[in-house]
């Protein structure tokens, strides 16, 4: 069985002075290929007897910038896909035997989903509505009999009776998450997006963030689905987010919970949230003392809880982020690029959270829109958090990472023609090791990310002001680069002070405008921001 070398793939996790009781464990990834399994991202999945049922998602990479090309129908996944990761086999069947309403929703992207027993419940999603002849966020909940559909797809028999769909405007959500706490469903945040995507904010769409936790109870007798909506929770500031990670948790008091990590966009600025939101059966609370600098968009996440140490670990694999590490320097890039970072967030018995960057990275700029698919035979709590203390063997296969966007460069958002990224077909086995030798993880001390760099006006005519904060005195350099990487100027700044600083600059020797990158670098941090110059 071929593996990447142990030295290049083992991800060591252990305790530090802050979390002295954390049980040692490590993780490694084993890449594997499944013949005929194509690339896919932002899909939904269910599973039964070790086999996966994959529904919806996109066959392409990052959405293109042109409204007519972004999220086009040609990129829809209109197949039901069954995968056996053990035998490495794949089966598929078209959605065409289903009603048009089912076909439309089940070929959408960014649906919310949750499996309860044999039934996979799929909510919302963004895609093309035949009835409305337009792209919409679907106001539907669809129930899928996972074992029956898997068997039908594998045997080539009829499956149309194994899908049921109801309509409810409360379910018109995309980019959120559907989770459960105890017996209640939680449809968390996300937005309703109708019309054609337009990155310039043109009049081709309407978008409304839910800014809510929509709670409901669901009764399903196999024929009829009954929904009882409960009072929703509104938080216009902290729940104004989508494309985030919602990770099941075991909280310090032993209760089930959910933590909302990062996501976009902050109400006042087009940047990710750095804070997190904890949700339990009693309500929600914003963690004002913790900032997450890595893994800001939806990616594969592995949740592990040690009852003996009362510590909750959430491990994030790649994706997109505003920050990344470069040779020990935290780089802030407000273009929010694709990253390779693998990081964990650990919550200790007192409820304090800390972020650690693992010593190795994903093998490429990948992970955004991927999913972690657990092995159901491994000991887990009711909410799918793994019971770390029950891992007896030295090596435990806990699940798989499949798909997501693979990008050829970190920042492709402003040049994306559809060829710079793709939907990945890569599958990784994810192992947890006990009794492994320990190593070093870099602690994000929460004092990083303090430059808070701003450029205004932006766009400008070459005359602009840069505002930034310093937490310590030392050499500070400001540099300007063209979009092709050519450095235009490099200047050491003097007469600075601890706290807020401003730097004014007028550039007169540019023959033409365009996109440029301005960088401020200190001994402890580096921030980069795209600016547009229109002379």
Image (cartoon, helix red, strand yellow):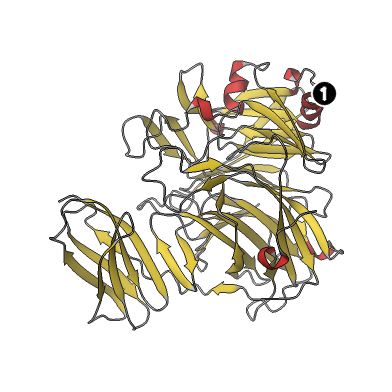
Percent of width and height locating residue 293: 49, 63
Q: Residue placed at 40% from the left, 46% from the top?
A: 413
Residue 502, image quadrant:
bottom left
86 to 271, vertically: above or below: above
Q: Residue placed at 57% from the left, 55% from the top?
A: 318
Residue 33, image quadrant:
top right
Query: From the viewer's perspective, is 466 left or right of 19?
Result: left
Q: Residue placed at 79% from the left, 55% from the top?
A: 397
- Residue 248 appears in the rendering: no
Residue that mark 1 sits on: 155
Nearest to the observer: residue 3 or residue 75: 3
Numbered-mark total: 1
Nearest to the observer: residue 68 or residue 209: 68
Percent of width and height locating residue 94: 67, 22
Query: From the viewer's perspective, is 89 left or right of 209?
Result: right
Nearest to the observer: residue 422 or residue 457: 422
Spot the residue most to the left. 508
Residue 11, image quadrant:
bottom right
Percent of width and height locating residue 224: 73, 23
510 to 160, vertically: above or below: below
- Residue 287 appears in the rendering: yes
Nearest to the observer: residue 72 or residue 291: 72
Spot the residue most to the right. 392
58 to 362, vertically: above or below: above
Percent of width and height locating residue 114: 68, 40
Q: Residues within 10 Å of mark 1 (few under 14, many from 20)?
A: few
Q: Secondary structure at mark 1?
A: helix
260 to 9, vertically: above or below: above
């Amino acid at each position: 069985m071929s593996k990447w070398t142990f030295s290049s793939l083992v991800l060591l996790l252990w305790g530090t002075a802050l979390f002295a009781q954390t049980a040692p464990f490590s993780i490694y990834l084993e890449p594997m290929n499944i013949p005929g399994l194509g690339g896919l991202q932002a899909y939904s999945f269910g599973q039964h007897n070790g086999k996966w049922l994959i529904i919806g998602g996109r066959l392409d990479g990052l959405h293109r910038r042109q409204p007519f090309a972004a999220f086009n129908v040609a990129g829809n996944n209109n197949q039901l896909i069954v995968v056996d990761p053990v035998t490495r086999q794949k089966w598929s069947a078209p959605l065409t035997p289903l009603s048009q309403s089912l076909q439309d929703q089940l070929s959408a992207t960014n649906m919310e989903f949750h499996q309860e027993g044999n039934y996979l419940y799929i909510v919302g999603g963004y895609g093309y509505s035949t009835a409305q002849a337009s792209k919409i966020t679907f106001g539907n909940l669809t129930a899928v009999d996972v074992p029956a559909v898997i068997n039908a797809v594998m045997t080539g028999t009829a499956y149309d009776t194994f899908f049921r769909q109801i309509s409810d405007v409360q379910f018109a959500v995309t980019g959120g998450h559907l989770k459960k706490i105890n017996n209640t469903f939680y449809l968390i945040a996300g937005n309703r997006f109708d019309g054609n995507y337009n990155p310039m904010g043109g009049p081709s769409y309407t978008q409304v963030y839910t800014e809510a936790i929509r709670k409901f109870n669901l009764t399903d007798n196999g024929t009829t689905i009954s929904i009882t909506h409960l009072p929703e929770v509104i938080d216009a500031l902290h729940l104004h987010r989508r494309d985030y990670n919602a990770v099941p948790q075991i909280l310090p008091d032993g209760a089930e919970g959910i933590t909302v990590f990062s996501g976009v966009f902050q109400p006042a600025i087009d940047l990710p949230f750095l804070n997190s939101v904890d949700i339990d059966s009693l309500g929600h609370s914003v963690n004002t003392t913790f900032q997450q600098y890595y893994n800001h968009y939806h990616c594969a996440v592995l949740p592990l809880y040690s009852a003996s140490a009362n510590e909750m670990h959430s491990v994030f694999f790649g994706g997109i982020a505003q920050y990344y590490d470069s040779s020990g320097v935290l780089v802030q890039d407000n273009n929010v690029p694709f990253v390779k970072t693998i990081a964990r967030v650990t919550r200790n018995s007192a409820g304090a959270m800390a972020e650690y960057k693992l010593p190795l990275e994903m093998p490429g700029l990948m992970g955004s829109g991927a999913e972690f698919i657990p092995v159901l035979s491994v000991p887990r709590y009711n909410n799918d958090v793994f019971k770390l203390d029950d891992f007896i063997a030295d090596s435990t296969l806990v699940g798989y990472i499949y798909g997501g966007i693979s990008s050829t460069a970190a920042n492709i958002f402003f040049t994306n023609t559809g060829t710079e990224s793709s939907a990945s077909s890569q599958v990784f086995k994810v192992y947890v090791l006990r009794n492994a030798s320990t190593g070093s993880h870099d602690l994000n001390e929460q004092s990083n990310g303090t430059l808070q760099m701003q450029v205004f006006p932006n766009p400008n005519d070459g005359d602009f002001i840069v505002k930034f904060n310093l937490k310590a005195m030392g050499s500070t350099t400001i540099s300007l680069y063209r979009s092709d990487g050519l450095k235009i100027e490099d200047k050491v700044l003097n007469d600075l002070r601890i706290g807020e600083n401003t730097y004014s600059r007028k550039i007169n020797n540019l023959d033409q405008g365009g996109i440029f990158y301005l960088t401020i670098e200190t001994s402890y941090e580096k921030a980069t921001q795209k600016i547009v110059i229109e002379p």
